[in-house]
Image (spheres, helix red, strand yellow):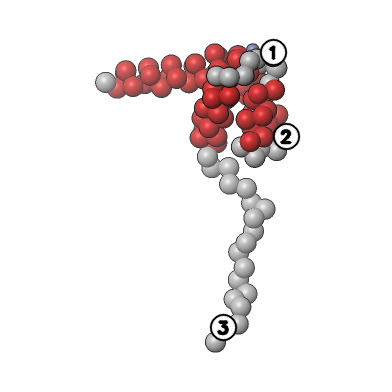
Amino acid sequence: MGTKAEVDRSETAIEDRAGEPDLFGDFLMGLMDVMETASCGGDFKNARQVLTTMGMSSDDQAGILESMEERGGHCDCGILVNVAGDMIRDAEEKRRASA
Ligand SMILES: [Zn+2]
């Protein structure tokens, strides 16, 4: 006859950040999608929108956009050209090197 178990492990405060590389990929794919129809205004308006859709807090967004700038992505289209382009090139070089 069940009394409620006292072990309640619903500690939702702990955020799972294990998937950060995936998070970049999701973000870049999402931005590519948006930029097919949107245009770049020389800022991160579309990038922020994608991150917001992904449920990122504005603190997390700032961190991601900062690392985009470090990689040469200074606006929506700059992210696609300099960051996404690099990642695709890297992946292809690795594929070619292992072939
Ligand atoms: Zn741009």
> Residue 11 lies in what quarter of the image?
bottom right
CA separation, marks 1 and 3? 61 Å
Density class for disc 1 (Cα within 10 Å; few <14, some 14-19, many ≥20) is few
Instruction: Name the kind of residue labelled 3 in the image.
Output: Gly
Q: Which residue is drawn at 66% across and 37% down?
A: 56
Point out the frontmost of discs 1 and 2.
Answer: 1
- The dot on residue 54 is none
- Residue at the right extreme of this rendering: 58
The C terminus: image quadrant? top left
Say whether mark 1 is within 8 Å of ligand 1: yes
Q: In this view, does 41 lie above or below 65?
A: above
Disc 1 and disc 2 in contact, CB within 8 angstroms: no
Upstream in the sequence, badge 2 or badge 3? 3
- State left or right for residue 8 relative to residue 91: right
Residue shown at the point (43%, 16%) measured from the top left? 89
Residue drawn at point x = 58 percent, y = 46 percent: 16
What residue sits right under mark 2 in the picture? Answer: 58
Relative placement, left or right, of 85 versus 50 is left
Which residue bears the numbered disc 3? 2
Amino acid tagged 1? Gly
Q: Which of the marked residues, 1 or 2, is nearer the chain's N terminus?
A: 1
**Occupied quadrant, residue 34:** top right
Which three-letter amino acid code belongs to the residue tagged 2? Ser
Q: Residues within 10 Å of mark 3 (few under 14, many from 20)?
A: few
The quadrant of the picture occupied by the N terminus is bottom right
- SS at mark 3? loop
**Residue placed most toward the observer, 49 or 22:** 49
